[in-house]
Amino acid sequence: MLSISYPQQVEGLPLWPVIVVVLALVAFNVVTNRLAPEGHHLLWALGGSFGLLAIGILDGNSWTDMGLGWAHLIPGLLWGAACVGVVTAGYLVAASFRRGRDAMHDQRVAELSGPRLMFQALVQVPFAVVLFEEIAFRAVLFSMLARRFGVVWAIVISAVLFGLWHILPSIGSHEQSAALGSVVGEGRRGNILAVGLSVVTTTLAGVIFAILRILSGSVLAPMGLHWATNGMGYFFSWTIIRARDRHRRRES
């Protein structure tokens, strides 16, 4: 169901509110990745989401401009549900191949208990990651950019900033994923390549998320795809790791 909606460009809007949002995101990124205790990330994300929405409203963006209008709720939900289904099917196909299972092996997931996995996939990811990032990049920032520079530049700039957003979280990721480590290598060079690969892939993801937000008129659509990519990844990785562990115990 197409429900295309995006903010119309307005001449003469000042640039400084966009700069404020970008600087706030930089500060938030540093705090949550380097300073705040891990257990506080959810509170930071919820507080940050409300703060960014307040800036968006004060800047003159309507709820519809930010992809949060009631008129686009149903299309957003339908698009989001379809994205979850497609991603789940993709994971199922990938899990049927050895290389696909190897790519899903993440040592950080291996250490999670069942209850902790559920909390991570159903609470931490949707509310501490997906909600904040979609509000920040596809609701507030996208709307502010579209009203100043047009929708095409809004897609490009918000996607690039979304890619750069992942620099800090991706540092050392090649040491946690054997598949990623085998591609980028080890040491400093491997770390640089892993970070660069993360920036590129998340920038492309940012373009897709923005297009989904436009086609559905709602940030619920990219939220669905964003959660499915991360949340279902946790479930599949954890299941594959546990199955391998059981197989090894039977053989020993």
Image (cartoon, helix red, strand yellow):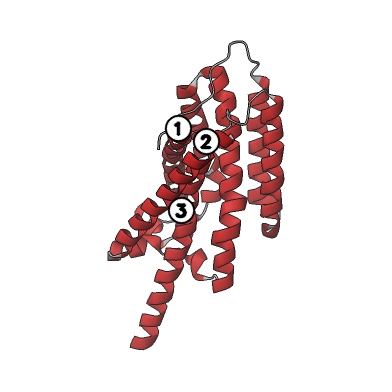
Mark 1 residue element: loop
Location of residue 118 with respect to 67 vertically, above or below? below
Location of residue 73 with respect to 60 vertically, above or below? below
Instruction: List the residue tagged with mark 3.
Output: 228
Q: CA distance from mark 1 to mark 3?
A: 22 Å
Instruction: List the residue tagged with mark 1.
Output: 3
Type of the residue with mark 3 = Ala
Q: Nearer the viewer, residue 185 or 54?
A: 54
Instruction: List the residue tagged with mark 2.
Output: 72
Marks 1 and 2, the one that precedes in the sequence: 1
Q: Nearer the viewer, residue 158 or 184?
A: 158
Q: Which corner quadrant holds the N terminus?
A: top left
Type of the residue with mark 2 = His
Q: Visible in this render: residue 186?
A: yes
Question: Contact (CB < 8 A) between labels 1 and 2?
Answer: yes
Identify which residue is drawn at 58% across, 30% down: 64
